[in-house]
Image (cartoon, rainbow, N blue to C red):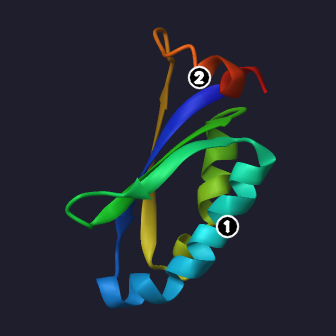
Amino acid sequence: MKLFVCIVHYTKPLEKVEEILPLHRAYLQECYNKGFLLASGPRNPRTGGIIIGKFKDKQEAILFSKNDPFCQKDTAEYEIIEFEAVLHSKHLNEFLAQ
């Protein structure tokens, strides 16, 4: 598994984002339950969000983004960055081992 940072960029006004937010968060919770997300939350200022997860490859990360209600409802776009966690907290070991 490889680590990815998904930078979410809102493409609609915040009012529209708020309408879709419960669906987006429910989708993310499903992904947390499956064990492949580490952290997520809104950026400051609130122009989008950040999601950190592990995926088999970039194609799997792209598929994850396309299944997000934000993308399906044309409310946000994803920028996906793969990285190698050469140094990390020991707390990350369990997440990476799953």
Asked if one can make out residue 67 in the rendered structure from this viewpoint, the answer is: no
Label 1: state its secondary structure: helix
The number of callouts visible is: 2
- Quarter of the image with the N terminus is top right
Q: Is residue 87 toward the left or the right of residue 66 in the image?
A: left
Residue that lies at the very extreme toward the left in this rendered image:
45
Give the image location of residue 88, x and y in percent.
Answer: 48, 15
Give the image location of residue 86, x and y in percent.
Answer: 48, 9
Give the image location of residue 12, x and y in percent.
Answer: 34, 82
Q: Is residue 49 toward the left or the right of residue 89 in the image?
A: left
Residue on which the image places disc 1? 27
Asked if marks 2 and 1 touch (Cβ < 8 Å), the reply is: no
Label 2: state its secondary structure: helix
Dividing the picture into quadrants, the one containing residue 10 is bottom left
Residue 91: give its label: none
**Mark 2 or mark 1, whichever is nearer to me:** 2
Q: Amino acid at mark 2?
A: Leu
